[in-house]
Amino acid sequence: MTGNKMLNRNKAHITAERNTAVLSVTMAVMNDDICEACSGTVDTGEGGRAKRRITAFACLLTTVGLLSPSLAAEQMPEGVFIDAKDLTSNEMFEVRRISREAGKDPWLIFGFRYGRGPESAPRRSEISIYLQPDVANAHLRRGRLLEVEMFAAPSAQPASGRIRFTRKYAQVIVLSGRPPEVTGRLDAHRPFVVDGEFDDQTLLRIVTLIRRSPPGPPLPNGQPSGTNVNGSLQISSIRRVDTKIEVMLNLDDDRGQYVTLENRNGEFVLVRLSHWIA
């Protein structure tokens, strides 16, 4: 065997091994939590634990040798997720001030604190403030979502925050009755972001379709796809993209589904179902 043939064979073998690794990691990511070999918790020594998360894509690159574990760990900022109970009294005062200047009291609060330390230790944070609904009826709530950057301040000084941007939110109640309580950041009933113009009936129809867990579009050969929408997942956003509507579903912070719908003769048709990985 000549040197060139041997070199080409070795290259093909390496490529096959890397492709196998990519496939293995992709399947693992879709069925399990983020790679435990590439993630971990950092003990702050102050009673808190900050999780250093490596995205699934970074984990994949690490597995196939294209990214070192140390560099992969730097792809996601270190910090902890927080909610209203983790805010200090100064921070909560600032949240109320910002909300009332926008015309409403706060309804739901979720956020992320950067760096190490317990959830309640003040430091730079990004906070999502859902204002009390502007519209509320038996089927949905609609209102505004303030994305706020909160700056660290000594306990004796007032916290300082600024609105980075404002979004629209909706919470759709498929079954008539008392609106469900939102119990956590990844709760399926958490209000979702609305990007684009949607009337109430359109939002209700979209969410009703998603909650039925419809099958994905047929394969090119006409056979069923074998994959369904996971209608139990949290809807994080509904947006218009040209003539289509995209619905983003969250399984957790790193994985979920994208559903693409198209209005055909007054009926929503599922034209694409894909999985996303952070």
Image (cartoon, grey):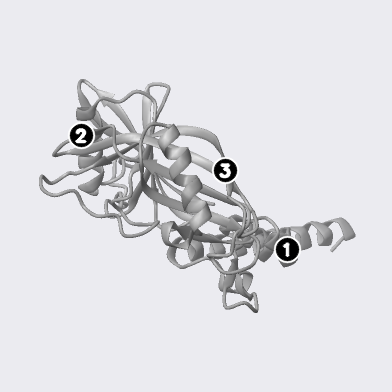
- Percent x, y for residue 61? 67, 58
Q: Earlier in the sequence, mark 1 or mark 3?
A: 1
Gap between marks 1 and 3 measured at Cα: 42 Å
Q: Which mark is residue 205?
A: 2
- Percent of width and height locating residue 268: 24, 30
Q: Position of residue 10 (x, y in %)?
A: 78, 63
- Could you tell which of marks 3 and 2 lies nearer the N-terminus? 3
Crowd around label 3: few <14 · some 14–19 · many ≥20 (10 Å): many
Looking at this rendering, what residue extends furthest in the front direction? 156
Type of the residue with mark 3: Gly
Q: Nearer the viewer, residue 179 or 255?
A: 179
Q: Are marks 1 and 2 in contact (CB under 8 Å)?
A: no
Instruction: State the mark number for residue 65.
Output: 1
Q: Position of residue 169 (x, y in %)?
A: 35, 37
Point 34% across, 51% down: residue: 234
Secondary structure, mark 1, is: loop
Q: Is residue 214 visible?
A: no
Question: Disc 3 designates what residue?
Answer: 161
